[in-house]
Image: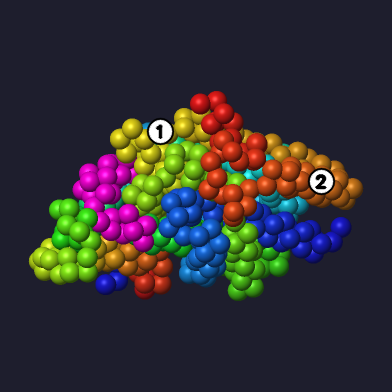
Amino acid sequence: MSTSLLAAAAAASTPATGFLGVNWSSIAEVCIVTLVATVVIVTVFSVGLRLLSIGSPDDGGETATAGTLSSRPVGATLLGYLCVGVGGAAVLYGIYLVVPLFHQH
Amino acid sequence: MSVLIVVLMVIAIALIFDFTNGFHDTANAMATSVATGALKPRVAVLISAVLNLVGAFLSTQVAKTVSSGILTEDGKGLPHITPVLIFAGLVGAVLWNLGTWWLGLPSSSTHALFGGLIGAAIIGSGLSAVDFSGVLSKIVLPAVLSPFIAGAVALIATYVAYKVTKLAEVHGAKRGFRHAQTVSASLVSLAHGTNDAQKTMGVVTLTLIVSGYQATNTGPQLWVILICGLAIAAGTYTGGWRIMRTVGKNITDVESPQGFAAETSSAATLLISSNLGFPLSTTQITSGAVVGAGLGKRLASVHWNTVSKIAVGWIVTLPAAALAGGVAAWLAGTGPIGLVIVVVLAIGGGGTFVMLARRHPVSQHTVNDDSATATGRPVVAASASAAS
């Protein structure tokens, strides 16, 4: 992949400067993309933590013994790890964006 | 007077500025992680220092264009700028950075740098040396927008994080948020390193170019990258505890879900804005995100008194640094004796702030203290909590 998704998005928008010599549409774009990206990442990660807590000692008032850990539903646990993994992938994409070597020819 | 001596002086003051930039901006990335206990203070500044150093080597794009659109250029470069003016501008920037650090204010080092340079340029060669529409669109507007964008995003993110995890009461949620917070804060640090170290590199390179030691339109040399990276990393490692306490404890008492939401919002705002070609300012992003995270939790209290002091600090930074840089440029412009006076005043002024800070020190051990019991009187929030 030679260009990033964001660079492609930036290229797609028309670079017109408007009032005060400022590209207001690119500001609006920054707001929307930031909001959506952050809320998606935070939501997915939080859902992951919630899923991973299912069946844990604190959940449902069971006593905290080693045995209760096995009552974790496999599906919720797997899905939980998947959600946390999405957060990890977002971080990797972040590093990719920070390091110009990765997305410049 | 030998050009070489002035160039060496510029390099020295540039590295001092870079050092202050480091400890001034550690708080940006690491304040919330230290406040929630996700990282021990020493570990936090070590991670931040290493990532700033790494970041310095990752890219030199910013260094090449540090002054473009702000100082007037012609076909060959910057006709109005001399090494003496750059020196004077840096003196202004360093003094303002030390002053705001003493007050515990998270002001923008970039604004201090550009403010100092703008003031020196105006005194040295008139208003035409500065591109004011560039100042508006590249400095003022991003600074005004950043806290609101990052704050609104952090507010929503915090609300979601608390809602989904039942106020982080579900098993393992707090620990999970703490780990995630560390990761996103590190990303902020790395992004910071790729930006701020380069601004000093850009200034040093600019000096080498205008004094004829380097060809125009060339990037920073390796030794410049190295010393600038090391200076900002060393500054970061000393830890700007005064500012860290303001951001992590005194705007609002940050909990781990809020820290996670704030750092994720900061990282996203920072990366997305610079990749979409409208870079926003780091300091304003991270402070705004902490305020948003405070508002995002029900019944959470944001100390507006502290916030308003920070906001005033932001507004004043550029003109104040410009004034200091302008006075320094005027003095230095009178000749070698004037330049010596500037050096003496800079050392005296900087030393005064350091001494004042030592009277009420904030260290890695007291960085998380409640401001009411802390001794750091001049730190903004001490008076904020006294008032509330």
Is B170 colored magenta in this rendering?
Answer: yes
From the top left corner, tell me how far across and down residue A104 is, in percent. Answer: 37, 70
Foreground mark, 2 or 1?
1
**Which amino acid, mark 1?**
Ser
Say whether marks 2 and 1 touch (CB < 8 Å). no
Left or right placement of residue A81 versus residue B197 in this view: left
* Closer to the camera in the image, B343 or B202: B343
SS label for mark 2: helix
Vertical order, B136 against A55 (above or below): above
Residue at left offset 69%, top offset 36%: B323
**Chain to which the residue tagged by mark 1 belongs:** B
- Residue B103: x %, y % from top left: 63, 39
In the displayed structure, B209 sits above or below B296; it is below
Image quarter for residue A62? bottom left
x then y, percent, for residue A46? 24, 54
Image quarter hosting the C terminus of chain A: bottom left
Residue B377, label in figure = none
Up-down relation of residue B273 to residue B383 (above or below): below
Residue A23 appears in view:
no
Q: Is residue A19 magenta?
A: no
Looking at the rendering, the stretch of residues picked out in magenta corresponds to B152-179
Viewer-nearest residue: A13 or B283: B283
Q: Residue furthest top?
A: B387
Q: Is residue B4 left or right of residue B133?
A: right
**Image spot of residue B309 (x, y percent):** 55, 32
The residue indicated by pointer 1 is: B301
Q: Which secondary structure type mostly characterizes the magenta part of the structure?
A: helix
- Which residue is disc 2 drawn over? B348
Residue B322 appears left or right of B147 = right
Marks 2/1 same chain? yes
Mark 2 nearby-residue class (10 Å; few <14, some 14–19, many ≥20): few
How is the structure coloured here? rainbow
